[in-house]
Amino acid sequence: ADDMMNLSKESGAISDAITGKTYIPMLEAEEVRLSQNLLALWKRRGSSWQESHPLPVDPHKDTILSAIEQNPVVVIAGDTGCGKTTRIPQLLLEHYILEGRGARCNVVITQPRRISAISVAQRVAQELGPNMRKNVGYQVRLESKPPARGGALLFCTVGILLRKLQGNPSLEGVSHVVVDEVHERDVNTDFLLILLKGIQKLNPDLRLVLMSATGDNQRFSHYFGDCPVVKVPGFMYPVKEYYLEEILAKLGRHRHRHYEIKQSDDECVLDLDLITDLVLQIDAHGEPG
């Protein structure tokens, strides 16, 4: 982190980690104006998506926000399906907006893959509604759709954030960094955690949220000075198994007449006719979703 800071000083101005433009600290008058506008937009949203589509993480909202406010680093251990990926960034933004300081909330959320960074950003924008959609953006290699300045949620890959650190080593202007799927433990993510630990000495106001579904979460806690671990239960969507004979019966087919199990010398060959008929059957008669 110190080497990056020296590099930034040599090159002059630092870059805005959210927009990618030259970073200019927000004046107090501009911050107040943006915060008031965000509050007005939020109140015009009507009923929220969270209210009509609750997820297991929602009842833990106060516990999560309190932990993040009071600690520089928090590990959120949420089971698969609890909603941590889409809801926690929204909870942070909502909390700041309702307190009248929405312009100070600028969150960078890392995803391990490009497709997840884009799809999660689109999902969060949809949940926030048309009034707040411009405050959600994403950046991946060769594709960027940055959010509006002040009150921003930026989803990006780990590699993109590492590049941003070269132009803004202390992440000035960023209120939170959320590292999702931290349990995957690839080289880039581990390197990012090393840098973020050093950055917090340069930027003590920065809040770091590590989100993990599985694995040894205490190891992350110990690395960041025994930071708190907030556990959020999840749920698995019901799954029903069907055997081939049941599928054939649903299709009104007889195995020996229509679908032969074709085998080559080395491996089983996919029966594309059966797959096609099954997809058409699900599309015509399956339940929504």
Image: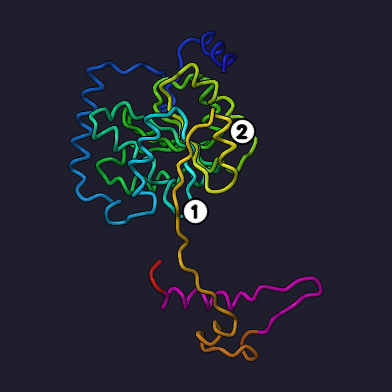
Q: Give the percent coordinates (x, y) of residue 195.
A: 57, 24
Circle 1 Cα neighbour tier, 10 Å, few/some/many (<14 / 14–19 / ≥20):
some
Q: Which disc number belongs to residue 225?
A: none
Name the N-terminal-most of marks 1 and 2.
1
The magenta stretch spans residue 261: yes
Q: What element carries label 1?
A: loop
Q: In which quarter of the image is residue 97?
A: top left
Q: In which quarter of the image is the N terminus?
A: top right
Rendered location of residue 192, percent (x, y): 57, 30
Q: Compared to 236, does 93 lie above or below?
A: above
Q: Is residue 195 above or below residue 137?
A: above
The residue indicated by pointer 2 is 190
Pointer 1 with pointer 2, Cβ within 8 A: no
Q: Nearer the viewer, residue 186 or 283?
A: 186
Question: Judging from the image, what secondary structure is the residue with disc 2 in?
Answer: helix
For badge 1, the amino acid type reads Thr
Q: Residues within 10 Å of mark 2 (few under 14, many from 20)?
A: some
Residue 10 on image: x %, y %: 54, 8
Query: Residue 61 lies in what quarter of the image?
Result: top left
Q: Residue at x 28, y 46 (%)?
A: 129
Residues under labels 1 and 2: Cα distance?
22 Å
Provide residue 156's location: percent of width, then percent of height: 48, 37
The answer to whether 242 is drawn above or below residue 150 in the figure is: below
